[in-house]
Amino acid sequence: MKKLKIETLIVLVMALGLFSNNMIAQKYPNENVTLSPREQSIIAIAALTAKGDLSKLNTALNAGLEAGLTINQIKEAIVHLYAYCGFPRSIRGLQTFMEVLTERKAKGINDVPGAEASPIQEEPSKYERGREVLGKLTGAPQGGPRTGYSAFAPVIDVFLKEHLFADIFERDVLTYSERELVTISVISSIGGAEPMLRSHLNICLNVGLTPKQLQQFISIIESTLGKEEANAAQKILDEVLNNKKTALVFPKGDVITNNNFTGTAWLQMLVNNDSTYYTSIGNVTFEPKARTNWHKHPGGQILLITDGQGYYQEKGKSAQLLHKSDVVKIPPDAAHWHGAAPDSSLTHIAISPNTDKGSVVWLQPVTDVEYNSCEYRR
């Protein structure tokens, strides 16, 4: 039987995507992952600092330290938020934190300082680095012409990319998801910035936070600030999640339960292998840091990156950073692995042709050392 050409397979995948629009009414996948105590504390600290409620902030800072946040992580969160609510709130937050640390030290409590920020690479230019970071956060290319306020006042586009997304977001004391929790907490606190909140809630989903975690975020905003702020944020979150449901092309599928993956990943088979097409096609989603074992395909493989960021690496070569819309052509019998970046989920369509030459050959797991050695500048 004649085998289907790769070009025809890709057309088939896209046709399946159109067909799956009939499934738009399905619920957004409900991951059973909740915000950690540290993340919950970051939300409360950021919201109260932005609001200027220093009495409640004192309590939240103590709770954050008890939850396991380091001194430097809390300092970084308070410094980060100045870009969204100004120096006065940020400085008052830092002064309140200094008082808390003095009080705790007087009680004999020695809190963990934590890691300092790693040195930032100076090349390429700060603007280019900021544009790269923004691309990672949004999962969208950043090379097009300026529009909206960036076209109206180009200098703010420069300031945003050079300072906010290069100077601040590149610092590795906090992860992307933690920085986004700070950001949406501040925006929810100050109010009146719905377009920015909408944008950053989408980024939250793109860097690996789940709808359930964002719903928990709303609950923390209500208990920390009040119903008015929570209701306003809930309205925007509902809009974002409804748009995500509509945009969902393929189902997420089921959690993969075999030992060929590290971390949590989901699989939805789209085309099962048979003796007509000699091809299997699956939709695979990785949570942050999740990845396959080393493995190889006798007939090769093609990956179509549909969401998030991650890595692809062949044995003996440097890891390749993956973005939405990337296409990876994997040679037959090339030992490789692929998976999500530390601060982002990754979704791809995996096309495995020529299966009459043999099925996938699974090898050893990708170690933490191998994974952490990937060049990934935050």
Image (spheres, rainbow, N blue to C red):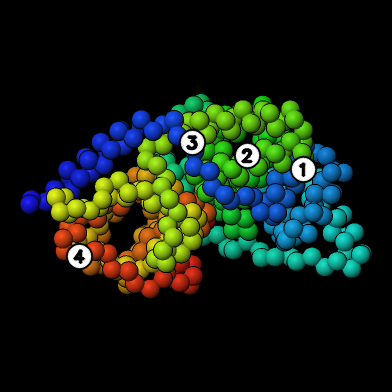
- Secondary structure state at the residue bearing disc 3: loop
Question: Could you tell me which secondary element the residue under label 1 belongs to?
Answer: helix
Q: Are marks 1 and 3 in contact (CB under 8 Å)?
A: no
Furthest residue in direction right, as rendered: 106
Q: Which mark is residue 61?
A: none
Would you name the residue on which mark 3 appears?
A: 27
> What is the spatial separation of the Cα atoms under label 2 and label 3, in whole angstroms?
15 Å
Q: Residues within 10 Å of mark 3 (few under 14, many from 20)?
A: few
Which of pointers 2 and 4 lies earlier in the amino acid sequence? Answer: 2
Residue behind mark 4: 358
Residue type at mark 4? Gly
Q: Marks 1/4: CA distance?
A: 59 Å
Image position, residue 148 (x, y; %): 49, 26
The Cα atoms of the two marked residues, 2 and 1, are separated by: 21 Å
Single out the mark in the foreground, 2 or 1: 2
Which is more foreground, mark 2 or mark 3?
3
The local secondary structure at tag 4 comes to loop
Task: Note whether residue 208 is visible.
Answer: yes
Residue under pointer 1: 49
* Alpha carbon separation for disc pair 2 and 4: 45 Å
Q: Which numbered disc covers residue 215?
A: 2
Local crowd at mark 2 within 10 Å, few (<14), some, or many (≥20)?
Answer: some
Q: Residues within 10 Å of mark 1 (few under 14, many from 20)?
A: many
Q: Amino acid at mark 3?
A: Lys
